[in-house]
Amino acid sequence: MIKRLNLFLLVIILSSCSNSVSKKDLQGTWWNTAETGDFEIIFKGDSIAINNGFGITLYGTFNLEKDSISITVNNKTHKEYLKYKPGDSLLIFNNSRYFKSPLSAIEVDKTFHFIDIKSKKTIHFDTIKNSTNFIKLSKSNLKTTQLILNDKKADISMIPGFLLSCKIPNKYKKPFILLGKGITLKELTRLYSNFDSVNFPLISVLSKYEFKSRKLHYYDIRIELFKEQLLKNAPPPRELNVTRTDYIKKFKPENVVIKSKEDFAKLDTLKTDLNYLISIDLDLPIEEYLHLNQKINTLRKKEKFNIRTELILL
């Protein structure tokens, strides 16, 4: 009888020291005060919202297991490490520390839905989250194109001033374009002349965010516009911009026309001793355009091909 009583007391003691968490314990808003990790986590019923602080939010449902949480988003489930310390009101989620907010749970209203295109190149979110040159291009209700410069709604004409305000003296600072769901190639390229006007020839297009690894998929794009194209759009071209006619006269390039993914094979036949003008159809699906740019960049860097591109309606 005494042994049973001692065993019963031991179970009670171990249970009281357990760091297990229930769905009831999680309800509400949890804030991250560290340099790494997402900005906040919101639990409401069986739902979870993870906000990284830049309007990039994951919505899903969750189930608790021992020392872990299973999160289901778009019919896909993955596990994260989870530990709860009730005495400190501390939640350890994916190796980051979160503290219970005294405020009631609120809905995350700055939501950004990525176009969700994978790239061969990724970058960890913590390495760029303190940048001040985020440009979000998305669709409001998947209908109206919306431009946001950092956290403020804007129109295309405001891009040059925004980029110059982000520039560090004597140091080039590449802008990051967050590409939203539903954006087309034509909508993306409407921004290009504004980048060119203030000498920003390179951009990074962010196309996908992985919450588990906190990595962003991205594509580097070199902006190349002829003076004829710039004259059709404000602001005016710079002195160093050349006309298509002058470029062809000077370099006598071979013209490679890309109208579909099947045409990508043409790039496999290029020769290092020639110049090339690659004409890309503006009606090309944006996913194929991004992959095409990645291939062209590889040819330029590794094979040293002399390539210039143009975006036109074919």
Image (cartoon, grey):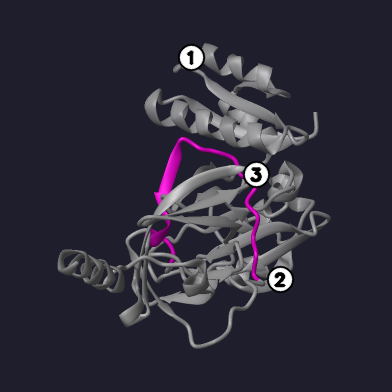
First-in-chain label (3 vs 1): 3
Front in this rendered view, residue 179 or 60: 60
Which residues, given as a range, are shown in magenta? 110-129
148 shown above or below 276 = below
217 shown above or below 161 = above
User: CA separation, marks 3 and 1?
Assistant: 24 Å
8 shown above or below 313 = below
Question: Of discs 3 and 2, which sits in the foreground?
Answer: 2
Residue 276 pos. (x, y %): 57, 24
Q: Secondary structure at mark 3?
A: loop
Residue 148 pos. (x, y %): 66, 67
Q: Secondary structure at mark 2?
A: strand
Q: Determine crowd level at label 2: few under 14, some 14-19, many 20+ residues with C-alpha closer than 10 A.
A: some
Q: Is residue 261 magenta?
A: no
User: CA separation, marks 3 and 2?
Assistant: 23 Å
Residue 165 pos. (x, y %): 52, 74
Task: Name the side, left or right, on which 233 lies relative to 7.
Answer: right
State the predominant SS element of the stretch in magenta: loop
Residue at which label 1 appears:
271
Residue at which label 2 appears:
154
First-in-chain label (1 vs 2): 2
The amino acid on which the numbered mark 3 sits, given as a three-letter code, is Leu
The mark found on residue 225 in the picture is 3
Outermost residue to the top: 269
Q: Secondary structure at mark 1?
A: loop
Quadrant the N terminus occupies:
bottom left
Quadrant the C terminus occupies:
top right
User: CA separation, marks 1 and 2?
Assistant: 44 Å
Front in this rendered view, residue 125 or 148: 125
Residue 205 in sight: no
The amino acid on which the numbered mark 2 sits, given as a three-letter code, is Ala
Disc 3 vs disc 1: Cβ atoms closer than 8 Å?
A: no
